[in-house]
Image (cartoon, grey):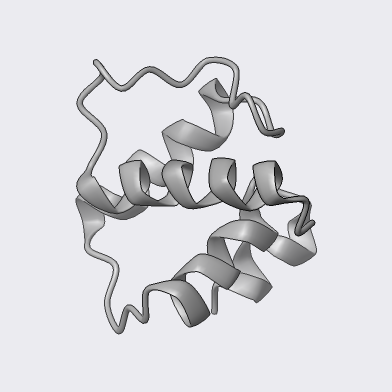
Amino acid sequence: MFTLLLVQQGVPHSKNWVDYLERQRPVKVVNRDQWLSFWEFTREVEEGDDMKGYSEDQAWPTLIDGFVEWVRKKEKEGQK
């Protein structure tokens, strides 16, 4: 479903998000708060290893904090 809604529409972070949800942290359900927070995240945070616009001090759901940590680690290791 995320692939249809996000990846095919070119939403920022969507490919990594789908990969994270399916492979790195198998998630069966994304609740409304997580969905809306991810949508806001795509608007506020730039893609890339520095995730410009993301702050650990903001009140992101744990799922998104884990996603950012995973992307940063992946980019640092050069696994694009």
Give residue 15's quadrant in the image.
Answer: bottom right
Q: Tell me residue 21's x, y (percent).
A: 45, 71
Locate residue 5 relative to residue 20 in the image: left or right.
Answer: right
Could you say which is closer to the camera, residue 34 or residue 21?
21
Seen at 63% across and 53% down, the residue is: 74
Q: Tell me residue 80's x, y (percent).
A: 79, 56
Quarter occupied by the N terminus: bottom right
Seen at 50% across and 80% down, the residue is: 23
Seen at 75% across and 59% down, the residue is: 79
Could you say which is closer to the camera, residue 57 or residue 1?
57
Locate residue 61 relative to residue 79 in the image: left or right.
Answer: left
Could you say which is closer to the camera, residue 79 or residue 20?
79
Which residue occupies the extreme front position in the image?
77
Give residue 38's quadrant in the image.
Answer: top left
Asked if residue 12 can be seen in this view, the reply is no
Q: Is residue 55 above or below residue 73?
A: above
Q: Is residue 41 above or below residue 38?
A: above
Asked if residue 20 can be seen in this view, the reply is yes
Q: Is residue 1 above or below residue 64?
A: below
Q: Tell me residue 48's x, y (percent).
A: 71, 33
Q: Tell me residue 70's x, y (percent).
A: 48, 52
Seen at 27% across and 77% down, the residue is: 29
